[in-house]
Image (cartoon, helix red, strand yellow):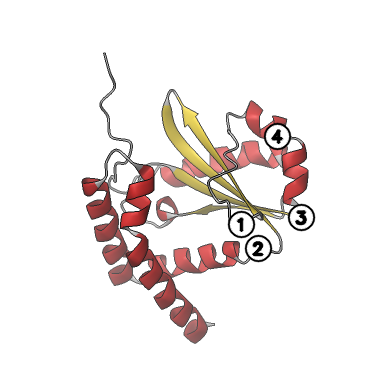
Amino acid sequence: MEDVAPVVEVVAYDPAWPERFTAARRLLVGALPTAVSIEHIGSTSVPGLAAKPIIDIQVVVPEVEAVLADLRPLEQLGYVYRPLVFPDDDQHLFFPRDTAGKRTEHLHVFGVTSPVPAENRLFRAYLAADAGAARRYEAAKRLAAERHPDSRARYGAAKEDAMRQLAAEARLWGSSTG
């Protein structure tokens, strides 16, 4: 029997998401001992925000090359390196993790010189602080998932304009709040 479950599904906020991150973080501390930080990012990190039930984890390391030199610790945890997901950013490594055949985590590893982790933190903080912004993002995500339940790539592209707009708002918000 063929599995007909959608690849992309946006669900109501689950209070277990922070616990799932904490469990993953415990394992990643051992697998990436030089990590400068390990953080919960993405929609599942924003209390009350509907999201795909996939935990996004951001790790900052001194050198991404050192992670690439020995992928075994991450592979032993079930993370699979996908080198072509962010081809224009050599400081961004991507590792999805599936559990029981279902995507459960996205691990993003950045070098310390990458500006992306700070942008991700700002976006998360903005959505957590501004309920209207969070609701607009949620609406964009739900519409994108409704239109593209079979493609993570098309889902991502469909919500890109909303993300870009909200990221610009987050930068303005960040500069005014310090």
Residue plotted at (37% across, 61% down): 160
Name the secondary structure under disc 2. Answer: loop
Tell me residue 154's x, y (percent): 33, 48
Q: Which residue is disc 1 drawn over?
A: 89
Q: Which residue is disc 4 drawn over?
A: 71
Of 40 and 102, nearer the camera is 102
Of 122 and 70, nearer the camera is 70
Q: What is the residue that sits farthest to the bottom in this orientation?
A: 176
Q: Which residue is disc 3 drawn over?
A: 62
Q: Exactly how many numbered labels are in the figure?
A: 4
Dots 1 and 2: beta carbons under 8 Å? yes
Q: What is the residue that sits farthest to the top in this orientation?
A: 1
Q: Quadrant of the C terminus?
A: bottom right
Image position of 50 (left or right of 116): left
Binning the other alpha carbons within 10 Å of mark 4 as few (below 14), some (14 to 19) or many (20 upward) gives: some
Q: Amino acid at mark 4?
A: Leu
Name the secondary structure under disc 4. Answer: loop
Residue plotted at (27% across, 66% down): 136
Q: Amino acid at mark 1?
A: Asp
Name the secondary structure under disc 1. Answer: loop
Of 167 and 19, nearer the camera is 167
